[in-house]
Amino acid sequence: MLASSSGPYDALVALHVVCALAGFGAVAISGVYGGLARKPSNQAETARYFASGGRAEWLIFPVPFFGLAALLVDHRSDDLTDVWVLGGSVLWIAAAALLLVVVRPAEKRLRSGEEIAVAGRALMLAGIASDVLFVAALALMVTQPG
């Protein structure tokens, strides 16, 4: 998003960015630990990591809402039909679906000790896919094609 002198706009963009970094970062780290979980020698370490609830990844969900609110506060409602906004929305939907359909179930299986190798691989691949979606969305947000 373009820089603006508006306080509310800046705050909303900051929330948008912080939520994206924290949420996608948490999924990426879970993906790394999922990959490590596939080796029996790493299972104690990964069990410690997955002992937590993995709440930071839920920060992916408010990302588009803060972005949309920033556009509306900055009176940029015309941008809502631009390629970068629509494309970013599609990428976010894919990331949210990935989180709900693959990441969370794989983490649950790892926490319970079920199918560790299979769940670890699924989580690793989901982490990679999430990273790709994040980079693509970031490219759209920075370049803002019309």
Image (cartoon, rainbow, N blue to C red):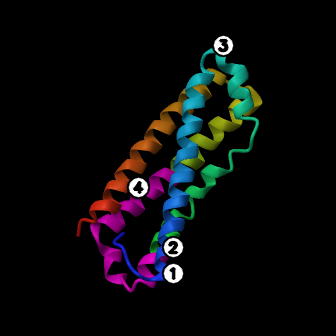
Q: Is residue 54 above or below residue 74?
A: above
Dot 3 corresponds to which residue?
Answer: 41
Regarding mark 3 in the picture, which secondary structure is present there?
Answer: helix
| Residue 107 screen position, x and y as percent | 66, 37
Q: Which residues are magenta?
A: 69-96
Regarding mark 2 in the picture, which secondary structure is present there?
Answer: helix
The answer to whether residue 140 is left or right of residue 114 is left
The Cα atoms of the two marked residues, 2 and 1, are separated by 6 Å
Name, please, the residue furthest toward the top: 41
The Cα atoms of the two marked residues, 3 and 4, are separated by 36 Å
Q: Are marks 1 and 4 in contact (CB under 8 Å)?
A: no
Checking the image for residue 8, the label placed there is: 1
Q: Amino acid at mark 4?
A: Leu
Dot 2 corresponds to which residue?
Answer: 12
Q: Amino acid at mark 1?
A: Pro
Q: Amino acid at mark 3?
A: Ser
Work out which quarter of the rendered image holds the N terminus and state it: bottom left
The Cα atoms of the two marked residues, 3 and 2, are separated by 44 Å
